[in-house]
Amino acid sequence: MKTNWTITQAVPTDEAEILACTQAAGVFSGAEVATVAELFAGYMDDPQVSGYNFLVCRDADRLYGFACWGPTDLTAGTTDLYWICTHPDAQGRGVARALFQAVESAVRAIGRWQIVIWTSSKADYLPAQRFYTQMQCTLVAQIADYYAVADDLCIYVRRLVP
């Protein structure tokens, strides 16, 4: 497993690689890719106002994955993990784990204690569901036909112990 990746705050020049990574993942619709672009634009404008934070995992040559997260409005300790995405070339090599752990650290650093993740029940998302379980997230709710017929919303929570 490669260990010389760095996790950093995203910068403007990461945008094209973030969007390419999102598209390459092969599970996100055009509307979802456009949403990533919209959230990144908000992050670049002002993360304090938008509430979005982007972390990237890269080496000197390229971006291997990203995470987008932010504090949940009107809560004292909850954060949302909006996106975590690994380029197919790096899947299974610890990128998502490194990003998730970096999000956990950032969440703790701002005094929050839980992460909420919404994902799909579709077969394409089973690897994501397994990953969240491996990261000690608990499936706390499943809403049938939420996104579409036979596409449930699965809500996972990672409670952080101080």
Image (tube, rainbow, N blue to C red):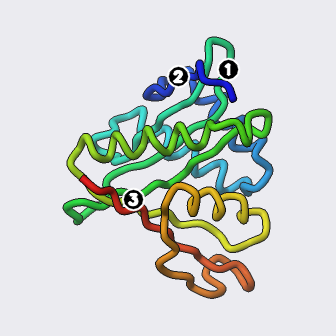
Instruction: In the rendered structure, find residue 115 and report the number of the disc placed on it.
Output: 3
Q: Position of residue 42 (x, y in %)?
A: 42, 41
- Earlier-in-chain disc, 3 versus 1: 1
Instruction: In the rendered structure, find residue 54 and report the number of the disc placed on it.
Output: none
Q: Position of residue 47 (x, y in %)?
A: 34, 39
For residue 91, what is the image quadrant?
top right
**In the displayed structure, would residue 13 be above or below residue 68?**
above
Task: Look at 43% across and 66% down and name the residue there.
Answer: 157
- Earlier-in-chain disc, 1 versus 2: 2
For residue 76, what is the image quadrant?
bottom left
Instruction: Check disc 3 and report its element: helix, strand or loop.
Output: strand
CA distance separating discs 1 and 2: 11 Å
- Residues at discs 1 and 2 in contact (Cβ within 8 Å): no
- Amino acid at circle 2: Thr
Task: Look at 30% across and 61% down and name the residue there.
Answer: 78
**In the displayed structure, would residue 50 be above or below residue 46?**
below
Q: Position of residue 67 (x, y in %)?
A: 52, 42
For residue 144, what is the image quadrant?
bottom right
Instruction: Check disc 2 and report its element: helix, strand or loop.
Output: strand
- Earlier-in-chain disc, 3 versus 2: 2
Q: Which residue is mark 2?
A: 6
In this rendering, position of residue 117 left or right of residue 86: left
- Front residue of 67 and 139: 139
- Amino acid at circle 3: Ile
In this rendering, position of residue 50 left or right of residue 68: left
CA distance separating discs 3 and 1: 28 Å
Task: Look at 20% across and 49% down and name the residue there.
Answer: 111
Instruction: In the rendered structure, find residue 62 and report the number of the disc placed on it.
Output: 1
Instruction: Check disc 1 and report its element: helix, strand or loop.
Output: loop
- Amino acid at circle 1: Arg
